[in-house]
């Protein structure tokens, strides 16, 4: 996979923090200006908590990028992230990888 942009998130992907994390992700997407064939990595190793609001945020991000012809890979999902994704069986909807490389 050819990596075009990477971002590491920290903190929480929960309802109280969803708007702030959403803004951070939107800024990243706008800076990366993804287009067809690009690959963006989102490193979630430092996410301490995640709930359904966080899952919805990731799904919306993946959908936005697919609409632009780009691809999102979730890398280094923390235990909290992996648990929510497994609970809601979202592994098929979100591409997961266990690699290093994203930067804040």
Image (spheres, helix red, strand yellow):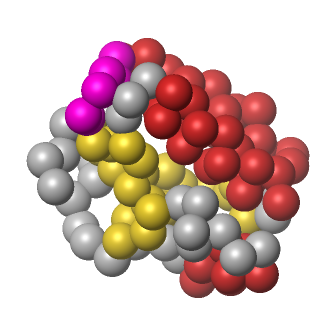
| Left or right for 54, reference 64 | right
In the displayed structure, 62 sits above or below 35; it is below
Nearer-the-camera pick, 78 or 1: 1
Considering every residue shown, the one lying at the far left of the view is 2
For the point 28% across and 53% down, which residue is it?
Answer: 102
For the point 81% across and 64% down, which residue is it?
Answer: 51
How far from the left and from the top, in percent, is residue 82? 60, 78
Nearer-the-camera pick, 88 or 15: 88
Q: Quadrant of the C terminus?
A: top left
Magenta region, residue range: 33-38
Q: Is residue 9 magenta?
A: no
Nearer-the-camera pick, 91 or 47: 91
How far from the left and from the top, in percent, is residue 30? 43, 16
For the point 66% across and 33% down, which residue is it?
Answer: 22
How far from the left and from the top, in percent, is residue 45? 45, 69
| Left or right for 28, reference 90 | left
Q: Quadrant of the N terminus?
A: bottom left
| Left or right for 38, reference 74 | left
């Amino acid at each position: 996979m050819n990596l075009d942009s990477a971002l590491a998130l920290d903190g929480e992907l929960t309802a109280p923090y969803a708007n702030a994390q959403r803004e951070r992700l939107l800024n990243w997407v706008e800076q990366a200006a993804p287009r067809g064939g690009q690959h963006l990595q989102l490193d979630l190793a430092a996410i301490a908590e995640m709930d359904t609001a966080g899952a919805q945020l990731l799904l919306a991000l993946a959908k936005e990028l697919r609409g632009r012809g780009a691809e999102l890979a979730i890398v280094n999902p923390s235990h909290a992230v992996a648990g929510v994704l497994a609970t809601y069986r979202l592994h098929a909807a979100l591409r997961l990888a266990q690699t290093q490389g994203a930067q804040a």
